[in-house]
Every structure is written in structure tokens, then in C-alpha cells.
Image (tube, rainbow, N blue to C red):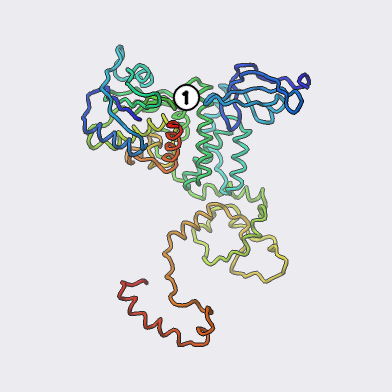
Amino acid sequence: MADAAPQPPFAVNDRVVYPNLGLCRVSGFETLTIAGQQVSFVTLKRETDGATVRVPPGKLTSAGVRRLAGKQEVADMFRFLKSDSDKATLDWKQRARTNTERMAQGGLIGLAEVVKGLQVLSELRPLPTKERELYDNARALLVSELAAALSCSPCDVEDAVDVALSPPGKERPRRTAEEFKRTADGDEDALGDDLLGLDGDLDGIPTDEPPPEGEAEGDGAGEEAPPKKPARSSKPTKAPKAAPRRPILSDEEVTMTMARAVALPAEPKKRGRPPGSTSKAKKQPKAKKPAAKAKPAKGKKGGRS
Amino acid sequence: MIRVAALDELDPQLLKGLCKHLYTAFGVGTELSEPVSYPPGMAEPFDAERLLEAAPAVRAFQDDKVLYLTRARLKERTLPTGNVPTHGYCRHGKDRALVTLAGVKDLEAGLPLVSRHALHVVGHLWDLYHCLDPRCAMFPPWTPSFEKGEPTFCTFCREKSERKIALAKS
């Protein structure tokens, strides 16, 4: 069994990068007996905390284990950070998928893409917690790999990354949704208007609020797309014309709606019994009189509008 | 525990205020150490990395963080992507950091800025990275808005530092 295993491309004491774990050093090759079979492993030790990782030689490539970045890769990465590249998509689901792939298989440039993409997105609006954590992880992995590749201190390397992203003396720019529009439109074409059946679930949600003007100009993917397919439902019911189909609900849309909801003043609570709670209330229309009498009492309290 | 050691003679009120800001931000004890002197054979402007390496040791426990304060100017650092001014320096994830007061004319009025720089470098000692929030002390310190901020962390950095400190204690 062990003889048939492919030869590992690394030697002992080589420094390698395991995706999402960081910088490791090849500490040796060993053969273990697992379930009665001899299985060979490459043993890696993580440099930050000394944790041991064992990977079968045949799975090194599929796991994404790679050598430490060379000078050319580092130069390419800094060039990428300085360049004005495409903006991240506003569709959170696609962005999460892309970033996960970049973290796992993208190499040094992949890490830089995640850092830059999320930083540019943060110039439009604050990142949600999960993406903020992803940004921090990507930055930590990028800095540790660069520090090892350049033989510099991590402090200098992190500053170098930030200088590439925003030169000293300049504030970070404030982005508008318009800048992300082109990418969002392209994503919409690629994915189609029915992303993972989300539109079917959203059909039942009443849309009381009219869309705000700023949002209609082009925030998220799929907002401007006219409905192409009939709604998925077993009954051919008459869909209300006032509620347009919204195939993809981008996270910005959700954020905007939440922000608006917070900004709006709370509706005054209706006093008295809810209609239809008792049969007497329906039969006796004079039941409103006590509410009318209660009005002066409201005024005494200092008044809700 | 954070130990503050001055390489120059500094106003005790300033040091007290700085310790208070550090304690508020990190939630760990902050203490003034005895003053230390510059290592021989070095002249202003100092190379921050060399000064930090050669600075005399301060009596401290193994997991203590030592913050050195100096009035002297620190050299600009040349990085692969350009030059940056050096307001402070640290051994990332380790035990020593350095902050200069050279750019601050009025130390009483400039205490929040000095504290913000101190929070930044000490934050690096607890593995914090640069932050996206301009109000946070971990925002890159060469941006103009850094000087206007308060010596506080954003929620993310605060929680991360608390986790790191708790791990270090355990």
C-alpha cells in the first residue's frame, strides 16, 4: 500500500501553506496503520501554534497545499492590490461562494482578492459579522505568508499591504452603489433570475413600502430585471400587480430595508380590543365611545401623535 | 498586564492618563515601570525596529506586554510598496511595542492621539490586524482621520482582543 502511494512533492523542512490554516513546515513522512491498512502521510506542523496536520501524499494537491509564494507571486500580488480591479458582487450568496473558493484554492492572489474585495465593499457599507471575520482571517493568512516570503516583520508587511490599498495621507474613498452596478448586472446574467428558488419564497411577502428612489437606480443584482417567468405556485392565482417579482434579494437590499425600518418612527399602538376578538364588539358599534372618552386622558400624558 | 516604560522623562499626569486609556480599552491591568535609558550607540532619528530590539528589558512576567514611550523621532520605514511615517512599532503577536510622542506638540491636548497610537501597537501585540472602521484605533495610523478619533476599539476588535487576552490568561 505504502509503495503505491504517490511521492510527495515536498521535502522535510520545506515551508508550505495549507489553505485556511496558514504557514506550515513539513516535519516528516510517516506510515500509520489505520483499520489494518498501511497508510502513508506527510506530517505538517503549523508555525503559529505547532499544531500537527497529517495529509496523505495523494491528497496534497486536492487539499490545496502549496509551496510558499515566490518573489514573482509577491510582486504580482502587490501589483494587483494597487490596481483598480473589478468590484465585488452585491449578491451576498455568490460573494460568499467566490470568497470561500479563493481562500481554499486561490493561493496568495486569492487571499489578496478576498482582502481587497471586502475592503472595497466596506467603503460602500459596513461588513456583516461573518464577512468581517473572513476579512480578518484572510488578512492574517496573507500577512503571515508575505512575512515569511519576504523575510520581514509582520508589522511591516501589514503596513505594506495597506499602503498598496490606500496610500499615506489619503482617506479611503467612499463608494456608491453605482460603482458596483456593472458587476452586479454581469452576475445577474450569469445566474439567471431565479437563484436557488429564492423568488418562490419571496412571492408571499407583502411589499407594503414603495421602493425608495435611490434603490431603484441600481443597487443590487436583479432589481431592475423585469419578471421573465410566471411565479411558481400550484394554483394559477391572480398575482397582485402592485407587488412586482423580485428574483434576487441582495443583502444590500435587506440592509437598506432594515435601516429604513429602524429610521422610521414606530406606528402608534391601537388602543382597545382588537376587532373581532369578541362577538359583542362586532354587534355593538357603540363600543367605540369609551375610546373617545379616553382621549382627554391621552392629552394629559403629554401626547403621542 | 501592560507595563509602560518611558525612555524619556515624561509628565506623570500624561502617563497616568495613558494608563487609564489602556486599561479601559483592553480591560487588563496597566502599570508604570521604572524609567529606562536609550541603548548606547544609537542616535535620533531612531530605527524603530532596532530601538525596540535593543531597548533594555523591563521587569515583567512572561505574558506581560511592554510599551516603551519616547519623545525622539523615528525614521520613516521603507516598505515594498512605499514609505510610511512611523508613529510606533511592535513585534506582532509578541511582547514589545514602541510609541513616539514626537509629532505631538501639546501633550495634554494630544493625550487621546498618543493613547490611540498606543492602543494600535499594543493591539498588534494581541494579534489584532488593521481594521476597516475609521473610528477604531486599529485603523491604519497614517490616514488623516486617525488623528480625529477616540482611543477606543470597534466592537469586532474589542471582542477579538478580549478573546486573545482570555486565551493568554488560561
Residue A1: % across, % down: 78, 22
Image-quadrant location for residue B90: top left
Residue B29: % across, % down: 33, 33
Left or right: A226 as drawn, with respect to A301: right
What residue sits 29% from the left and 30% below the top? B31
Crowd band around label 1 with a 10 angstrom C-alpha radius: few (<14), some (14–19), many (20+): some
Pick the residue in front: B114 or B103: B114
What residue sits 63% from the left and 16% below the top? A12
- SS of the residue under disc 1: loop
Given the current orientation, which residue lies at the most extreme top position?
B41
Above or below: residue A122 compared with residue B30: below
Image-quadrant location for residue B141: top left
Report the label total: 1
Residue B46: % across, % down: 32, 19
Pick the residue in front: A191 or B154: B154
Above or below: residue B72 compared with residue A234: above
Q: Chain of mark 1?
A: B
Quarter of the image that includes the C terminus of chain A: bottom left
What residue sits 53% from the left and 44% below the top? A130
Residue A51: % across, % down: 57, 26
Which residue type does callout 1 highlight?
Pro
What residue sits 67% from the left and 19% below the top? A29
The residue carrying mark 1 is B80
Pick the residue in front: B20 or A118: B20
Left or right: A19 as drawn, with respect to B129: right
